[in-house]
């Protein structure tokens, strides 16, 4: 999958990637290497690119070979190749090349400026967490673009309080009409349209990035073009649509964060989740230990439920005393003071 304005070369250079507009890496067997070339010139478009076949030739400086994971012979390789970059420098080069264009592309996908910046920043944070994998990918820019698009089009954003209300629309009436037409499209159709008519990918690459078959991607593209043409007949020509998408994306002043801030945010997020996992593991071990300490060690039979005993007369409260009982009570009370003679035996 080519980068924004980059085309990876085929051949035997598996694991190589180009992070430059219009640059093609040379073939070879350098697995796990990435070529970051600067100083290219690309045509205007959303993110500074044009569709395939319409890009102008670019002037390319000497490529700089990036070794994301130096091995034990790093010192010897550094002496041999003084232009080798550290992982942080390679990440910063990729970010500086891709982030401005990705912010504008995700703005076309979402219609929200803040969400576009957040999506790109989140995608690059994920790329820094998995940098060895991204650095060895054939298309690092495409990897980051796919992550940014997935985050931007996540349906869970509608439940976030900050995104429940729409942002102010573009100031120009034509831009507002085009943005409304884009937002009326289903998310998969909108993504296909931006990739094909905005970024300039060809149909198989668009289908691969959207995880669809080529016929399905073609149908989505045709449906999206028809929907936009119904609302804006002047954009029925694909070239006119491409130019208007580029103008709409460039009309807004969208700035991405600085690369060190993105890397620091990624590392803070990794530390947070690591500590959370450790805390959860300690809590689970403590709960298990407490359960083992307090759990019974032998079987205790349950107490059977009570049963009703038959044949017992009901308890009746005593009633008033009769005359005979009252006389007996009076006699007993009198004799209790001194006691009857039979209780005080006399010696004889």
Image (tube, rainbow, N blue to C red):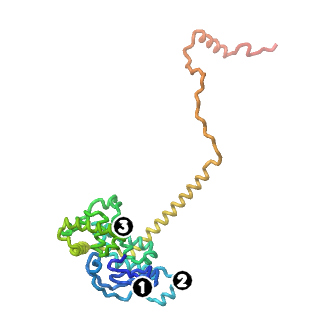
Cα–Cα gap, marks 3 and 1: 31 Å
**Tag 1: Cα neighbours inside 10 Å, few (<14), some, or many (≥20)?**
some
In the image, taking residue 345 as reference, residue 62 lies left or right, namely left
Give the mark nearer the N terminus: 2 vs 3: 2
Q: Residue 168 has which mark?
A: none
In the image, taking residue 143 as reference, residue 221 lies left or right, namely left
**Tag 2: Cα neighbours inside 10 Å, few (<14), some, or many (≥20)?**
few
Give the mark nearer the N terminus: 1 vs 2: 1
* Residue 121 visible in the current orientation: no
Question: Which residue corresponds to the image point at 28% horizontal and 80% vertical from the top-left?
Answer: 53
Which residue is disc 1 drawn over? 27
**Above or below — where is 280 with respect to 255?**
above
* Residue 98 visible in the current orientation: yes
Give the mark nearer the N terminus: 3 vs 1: 1
Q: Residue 150 has which mark?
A: 3
In the image, taking residue 12 as reference, residue 159 lies left or right, namely left
């Amino acid at each position: 999958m080519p980068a924004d304005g980059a085309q990876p070369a085929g051949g035997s250079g598996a694991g190589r990637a180009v992070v430059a507009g219009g640059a093609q890496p040379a073939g070879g067997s350098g697995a796990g290497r990435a070529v970051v070339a600067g100083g290219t010139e690309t045509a205007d478009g959303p993110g500074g690119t044009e569709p395939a076949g319409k890009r102008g030739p670019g002037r390319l400086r000497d490529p700089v070979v990036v070794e994301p994971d130096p091995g034990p012979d790093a010192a010897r390789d550094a002496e041999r190749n003084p232009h080798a970059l550290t992982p942080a420098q390679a990440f910063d080069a990729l970010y500086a090349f891709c982030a401005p264009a990705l912010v504008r592309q995700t703005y076309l996908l979402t219609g929200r400026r803040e969400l576009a910046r957040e999506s790109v920043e989140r995608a690059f944070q994920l790329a820094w967490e998995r940098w060895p994998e991204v650095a060895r990918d054939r298309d690092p820019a495409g990897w980051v673009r796919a992550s940014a698009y997935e985050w931007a089009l996540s349906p869970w954003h509608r439940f976030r309080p900050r995104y429940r209300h729409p942002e102010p629309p573009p100031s120009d009436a034509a831009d507002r009409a085009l943005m409304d037409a884009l937002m009326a499209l289903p998310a998969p159709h909108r993504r296909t349209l931006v990739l094909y008519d905005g970024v300039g990918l060809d149909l198989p690459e668009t289908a691969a990035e959207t995880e669809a078959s080529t016929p399905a991607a073609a149908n989505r593209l045709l449906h999206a073009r028809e929907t936009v043409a119904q609302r804006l007949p002047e954009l029925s020509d694909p070239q006119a649509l491409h130019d208007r998408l580029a103008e709409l994306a460039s009309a807004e002043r969208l700035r991405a964060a600085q690369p060190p801030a993105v890397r620091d945010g990624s590392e803070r997020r990794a530390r947070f989740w690591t500590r959370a996992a450790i805390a959860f593991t300690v809590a689970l071990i403590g709960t298990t230990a407490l359960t083992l300490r307090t759990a019974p060690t032998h079987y205790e039979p349950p107490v059977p439920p009570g049963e009703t005993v038959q044949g017992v007369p009901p308890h009746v409260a005593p009633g008033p005393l009769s005359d005979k009982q009252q006389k007996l009570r009076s006699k007993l009370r009198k004799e209790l003071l001194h006691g009857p003679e039979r209780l005080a035996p006399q010696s004889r």
